[in-house]
Image: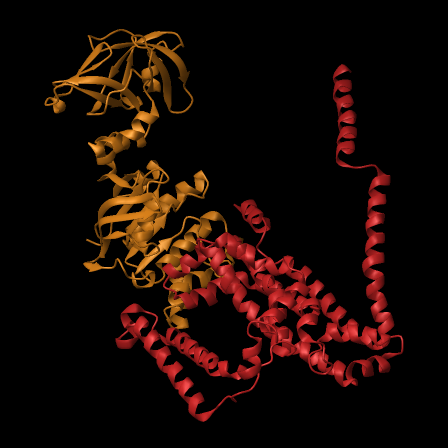
Chain colours: A orange, B red
Amino acid sequence: MSILIQNIFKTFGSFAALDNVSLEVPDGTLVALLGPSGSGKTTLLRIIAGLEIPDSGSVIHQGEDITHYSARDRKVGFVFQHYALFRHMTVADNIGYGLRVRKVPKAKIRERVGELMQLIRLEGLQSRYPSQLSGGQRQRVALARALAAQPTVLLLDEPFGALDAKVRQELRKWLRRLHEEIHVTSIFVTHDQEEAFELADRVAVMNQAHIEQIGTPDEVYDQPATPFVYDFLGNVNLFHGRIRRGRLRLGDTVFHVPEHAAVKDAPAVAYVRPHEVKVRAEPNGASGIAAVIKHVNSAGPLVQLELERVDDGSLLSAELTKDESSQLPLQPGTQVYVELKNVRVFPDIPPEPESMPESKSALESSPLEKDHA
Amino acid sequence: MNADVAVAVPKTVGSAQVRRAQEDPAWVRWGLIGLAIAVVALLVVVPVVNIFAQALSDGLAAYWSNLFDDPDTLHAIKLTLIVAPVALLANLIFGIAAAWAIARFDFRGRTLLTALIDLPFSVSPVVAGLMFVLIFGLQGYFGPFLRRDGYAIMPYLMSILAAGAFVLLFFLFRPIRATERRGLWDRPVLVVLAGSLIVFGVAFFLQQYFDIWPHNQSLKIIFAVPGLIIATAFITFPFVARELIPVMEAVGVEEELAAISLGASGWQMFWQVTVPNIKWGLVYGVILCNARAMGEFGAVYVVSGHIAGQTDTMPLRIEKLFQEYNLPGSFAVASLLTLVAIITLIAKIRLERKLPVGDGRQKQEEARA
């Protein structure tokens, strides 16, 4: 185990940034800390780097407790969100700085800087200043600078946050390849789920100072552990209903949820992703929900529908492929029948008066209330 | 046809409106410009030129002898060249410390400290001078003691300085990597406490038994050079800190954190990252501070007692020569101070372009991104 984080607490004044957070990062893996801003992910990264000291808890690096080590004794490379390149030093001096402060001979520094310039494919730009580089180039220099002293852990704080979409795509692929080449244990912070899924071996989803779920991208996306994770990873339809002995009633429709058979009678929230909403022109048995099309957006590879349920007037969204949509009469005002696949149900959420689906406030407060229970 | 007219008409109307909205009539523009030039010429250019004309009115040889043949004038020049750099050094150290505290830390009383740094700007220099007379003067709080046995504080002062130097050296020579610190190097609290006590004790013992500094002598602060330095330092107190705070805030803390995360010690970070980033702000502050320190009159006038050949600085000497109807001599010294001012002005304009303050740099970066 390369990095082991145990029961970290950290508060800033009255604000809890990290509340009993534990995380394991195996050797050579690329782990993403994914969460909205203010969820504590950057604080956790800074604690691992030694730029922030936890109130309690410990950081263990290859069996050694490094909680109270200074940043320089940790063999950790840190890449800042806004690069933080030394503006008065050339690219070569920036990359060599970590070696210079460790009193490495000049010839060796030059050699290592040359190596890294090749790795980041910026040969020939050694004597440029950071202000003469593009955003993507600066990001790569920042990465090379962090790697120069051969850290055993690489930490990246929103590494592509300040770049435009196209450069971000390229750099992501490049970083993934680089990680496959050098295999340094890496942790990066992001609020972009796509980025986390594309790059990371494992994803830790954070919310309000907690880690909600840790797993591979597939696990986290397909089996969200909490309503927050489900909602954070992509668009979602939200239904409030009641669950009775494995049967979930949403309006006039009943779903079988055998995994919650033990629950006698409790309010529940059900989530369905828009692409798991199947739309038919004719009812198919009892499970179809009648709805009226309100809006159609067919730009892009998928057709997005906004529907209003006939029974309770609540809104839901659906995504169809172009093939599926071509067989349906998709005009606003048309009545269609909706079938829900892969409904994920979270019981035990305190009852709420008949509210609209998509009500975000109910969602965001739910993880907290779960904790109190 | 219709289309042509429709296009052409709004164009002329639009441009006429734009011109009217952006530009004042010619007579307003030229009137204001002329007024500004006239005022500057009358109040600034003519007097400055006049200083040099008056100073050189008796020829270069007389100018030279006015400056360097009068022993009192020569002493005043030398005294200014002592007082200003010492005050400058004190304010440089204080300014960096204060700017660091205000720009980097969030603590109780931060706003109050920022306000207090500006206090010397708002206090009349004469009042500032009186303040020090009331503390250190004969009728002041410390006056009687300083007069009776002022040098008695020297052993304590020197011992404290020696102890401070010891603590500084300990942290300078300590191994940088925590894992390499063995024995006493790893016990900073013990070493600093015990070591500084020992150093203090030794220095104090040396004084008690070997009388390195004389006993039973009055230490003159008011009407002497220490008073001049204190008053000048007080007046020029805000310049360095005032210049540095916005520079340090604009540079931000991230590069320093990056240096730390790359393994730099606090000392390395300060000299290799912080100082290069703030150096132009520092130079700018020092130049302004120096100009003010050399030209300070009010506070220095009160504390100096203007004893010719002893406590007269250049501004005081100018006034005295003027009072004695020695106009060429007075203007000769004045021309020196004016020269300092002009050099300061040129340096200031050149440096302002290099400062990271303002949005110039950010705009450049945005334009590139």
> Is residue B306 toward the left or the right of residue A256 in the image?
right
Relative to A161, is B285 above or below?
A: below
Q: Position of residue A4 (x, y in %)?
A: 21, 52
Depth order, front residue of B190/A83:
B190
In the image, what residue occupies the spot 18% across and 58% down? Answer: A63
Depth order, front residue of B220/A342:
B220
Relative to B51, is A147 above or below?
A: above
> Is residue A177 toward the left or the right of residue B367 in the image?
left
In the image, what residue occupies the spot 51% across and 88% down? Answer: B215
In this rendering, does residue A82 appear at all? yes
In the image, what residue occupies the spot 45% across and 93% down? Answer: B210
Q: Position of residue A172 (x, y in %)?
A: 37, 44
Relative to A207, is A112 above or below?
A: below
Q: Position of residue A176 (x, y in %)?
A: 32, 46
Question: For residue A332, what is the image quadrant?
Answer: top left
Depth order, front residue of B75/B96:
B75
In this rendering, does residue A176 appear at all? no
